[in-house]
Image: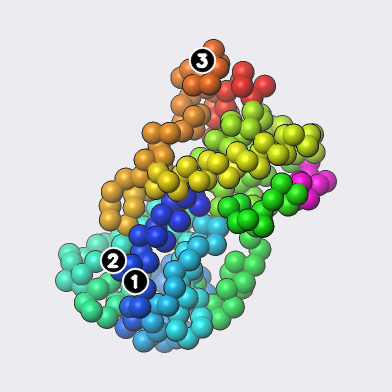
Amino acid sequence: MPELPEVETTVRALQEPLTGRTILEVHNDWPRHVGTPGLSELQARIRDQRIEEIDRRGKYLVFLLSSGESLIIHLKMTGHLSVVEQDAPPDPYAHTVFVLDKGKELRFRDPRKFGRVYLARDRDEVLGSLGPEPLDPAFTVETLRQRLKGRKRALKPLLLDQGFIAGVGNIYADEALYYAGLHPQRRADSLSEEDMRVLHASIRQVLQVGIEREGASIDRYVKPDGSKGDMQNAVAVFQRTGEPCYGCETGIVQRIVLGGRSTHFCPVCQA
């Protein structure tokens, strides 16, 4: 599933071709792709709306429309957005297609059909439960300290909780815990002040690197133009099971299942 760096990369790639474009109509062959307000109402309300800005909140893309409403898209596991010519060959997996002016289309390709499209007058209707943005200057060590207060969950599942911090998923949770030297099963209420400081820095570091490398094309993720990101060539532990740790060179990266998710760590560096 695309995480914060992959979604941020998608946002940046779509800003130039989409900002200022007008949505003429929406085609959809899978009504459940639309979360709210429902397909027919979305089609009616979004018609002739201009895309003013494109932003991100956690793992969601947010398109600010000229009506003041927000078109919100969650890519989920297999979602991909691309801008193509209207006469481009049809894609059987592009279940929602936004027909634009100047002969363009924004296609939401989603083979597994887990993605969702929302149209909201108040974006908090969809995004209000998300935790803070980890790269926002307002996300300080003190913010993390307060959010950890009283939490007894293991660190890895906690970092995956979008209500705790928005945008961190499996790849970057594993990487952040590695660089922080924290075992993924460590309880949140056991962290020292130094642990919190290092974890805060590690979360921000791995997300920044992910953005610089334009995401990790480890599974299905590719950029809007179809090319791959490069973060997969910079991971320290994620999906490196059985390989030597780059840091200590003595530990062998292990994999466990924690909270239903594959989790990778170095048993030496993250003892």
Work out whether 80 lies above or below 120: above
Compute the Cα span from label 3 to label 1. Answer: 47 Å
Q: Is residue 53 left or right of residue 132?
A: left
**Most foreground residue, 181 or 89:** 181
- Snapshot colouring: rainbow
Mark 3 or mark 1: whose residue is earlier in sequence:
1
Q: Position of residue 68 (x, y in %)?
A: 51, 83
Secondary structure at numbered mark 2: strand
Neighbor class of circle 3 (other Cα within 10 Å; few <14, some 14-19, many 20+) is: few
* Quarter residue 183 falls in: top right
Identity of the residue furthest to the top in this view: 250
Q: Position of residue 177 (x, y in %)?
A: 61, 34
At horizontal 27% and vertical 80% (from top left) the residue drawn is: 101
Q: What's the amino acid at mark 3?
A: Glu
Q: What's the amino acid at mark 2?
A: Val
**Residue matched to label 3:** 249
**Most foreground residue, 166 or 89:** 166
**Residue matched to label 2:** 83
At horizontal 45% and vertical 48% (from top left) the residue drawn is: 211
Q: Is residue 160 magenta?
A: no
Residue 49, numbered label: none
Compute the Cα span from label 3 to label 2. Answer: 44 Å
User: Number of labelled discs?
Assistant: 3
**Residue matched to label 1:** 18
Which of the image's four quarters has the C terminus? top right
Secondary structure at numbered mark 3: loop
Q: Which residues are magenta?
A: 145-152
**3 or 2: mark nearer the eye:** 3
Identity of the residue furthest to the front in this view: 137
**1 or 2: mark nearer the eye:** 1
Q: Is residue 151 magenta?
A: yes
Q: Position of residue 50 (x, y in %)?
A: 38, 82
